[in-house]
Amino acid sequence: MFDIQKGLENLLRHIKIAPEKPGVYRMISEYDEVLYVGKAKNIKKRIVAYSHINKLPVRLQQMVAQIERMEFIIVENEARALLVENELIKKFKPRYNILLKDDKTFPHLMIDVESEFPSLRKYRGSRRDKNKYFGPFASVLAVNSVVDILQKVFLLRSCRDNVFKNRQRPCLMYQIKRCSAPCVGKISAADYRVLVNEAIEFLEGRNSKIQEELSQKMQEASAREDYETALVLRDRIRALTTIQSRQNVEYAGIKSADVISLVRDKGLVCIQIFFIRSGQNCGNTPYFPTQTDGAEDKEILEAFLSSFYTNHIPPKEVILAEELENKTFLEEALNVKINTYKKGNKAALIKMATENAKASIARKIALEASVKSNLEAFRDVFGLPRIPQRIEIYDNSHNQGSFAIGAMVVATPEGFDKKSYRTFNIKYTAETRDDFAMMQEVLRRRFARMTDENKPDVILLDGGRGQLNAVYESLKDFDLSGIAIIAISKGPERNAGKEFYHMKGKESFALEFQSPLAFYMQNLRDEAHRFAIGTHRQHRAKSIYKSRVDEIEGIGAKRKRDLLSFFGSAEEVAEASIKDLQKVSGISKKTAEKIYKYFHN
């Protein structure tokens, strides 16, 4: 039992020395475990609230009872406090903080505005340059839908720069009226910049005058008998009209907002977020925060907003179902307006997000029930001491020993943990001459880096008893206690569902044909095979790419980069004439002849 009086005394002792400035505080136990990380505009005022022990929920009373000491970090403002808090939560994963597994990266649209002829592209990654970014979009499908709209209405190019610079005639996108073909001078730089600015205004929600301006330009073109231009403008107007007719009334007028709803059901908490940009629904996605027992909905939402928007660009407005206690702090820290609505279109959006959150919980419960049932059957059939929490599946892929790859995928009760996937490059030598030797090397390298945190309960191998024995031989110097090693070999006539399973000290056996567990095991093995084959093909493709350019005598890394940047691919380099090769910076006539002869002899 924890001594609540002792913990309270330690808290009061630290309140006396706490700074009255913005910053982050840590509550630490006598075992140096970080119990909780919090942020505040005024640290002292914030932690005083924890001293009113009778007003705290049981969860926080237990936390206060364990406080041995506290640490404070003073920062310059609320925004910095939010960032520091998020960094410390990720580092320490305190047991009393609400945790959000936020490993999703959302696609965006990018317009490289500093280019002479900016392009429209889908983009993932950091946004540190001066380009224009729009999003996020919940899925690639949502991005593609908006790209389709923009190409029809604004005729922006979507090709890569190296393709754009080397085109001799318009591509198919120009023929189907999805691009204005600036690559071959079908439009001037000034007129193209007008299209770019219109597209930016549309994406930023400032599109009320676009259709009116297009109509005026069409009339002017008709008046001067420039019917080709008038037809292009007419098609753009039609596309814009179609877009506007498809817009739901609930989204109309919303330039940039995220709609967020929280639902509890059957012990789960789901936060559903909808991205609304420029009157368009850019998709939605659910989150299931952990360590929420005993936490109130408002506390969970505040934790979500703090974590989510320190990793993703916030919109102009966040729409919630209820007011937050620390609303002002979050608005200042995140530079966003947080609002609630009881009626109107935005209230309807909250209702829609709530219904989707309920549906997400129902799907998660059904999925977890299925996975749990399979894992229980897994435990019983293979004689495991408990339901496996980490299953590692291994497979090799190579081409007669070349480009050999070992692959490891990881499955947990929550599904495939793709962040834990690993690949192992295998150099083909006398020691790794066959599949057995390759698997031995992979497992030795994996176990050499094993920790208590990533120790598997089960290892699945693609192979028969010979593979199983080879792996046990390679791991004889490692501690295998608590780890079940299972090999899976093909069934009669390689019939899926009739595989044989091999374990040390047991007779080989097959599972019931087409049983749920058999399908689950197939899924595990197929995922490892997919990952191994995919990685092997990438390495093989890179080697082909390398061999066709890098092996030319006198072509170093810089010249290779210049050639590929100019022509776009090794195949285009191979097809280039001597005259075209000389257009590349640093390629003399003599070098061009050498490259040409390499590919044509």
Image (cartoon, rainbow, N blue to C red):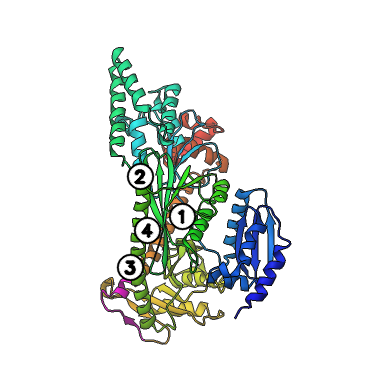
**Disc 3, SS:** helix
Q: Which residues are magenta?
A: 507-521
Q: Position of residue 73 (x, y in %)?
A: 68, 57
**Dot 1, crowdedness within 10 Å: few (<14), some or many (≥20)?**
few
Q: Are marks 1 and 3 in contact (CB under 8 Å)?
A: no
**Disc 2, SS:** loop
Q: Position of residue 241 (x, y in %)?
A: 29, 32
Identify which residue, 101 or 18, lies in the foreground: 18
Identify which residue, 158 or 225, lies in the foreground: 225
- Specify the amino acid type for callout 3: Ala
Give the labeled residue for mark 3: 366
Give the labeled residue for mark 4: 357
The Cα–Cα distance between marks 1 and 2, rounded to whole angstroms, is 31 Å
Of labels 4 and 3, earlier in sequence is 4
Give the labeled residue for mark 1: 104
Q: Residue furthest top?
A: 224
Q: Nearer the viewer, mark 1 or mark 3?
A: 3
Q: Is residue 518 left or right of residue 185?
A: left
Q: Are marks 1 and 2 in contact (CB under 8 Å)?
A: no
**Disc 4, SS:** helix
- Specify the amino acid type for callout 2: Gly
The Cα–Cα distance between marks 4 and 3, rounded to whole angstroms, is 14 Å
Does the image show residue 415?
A: no
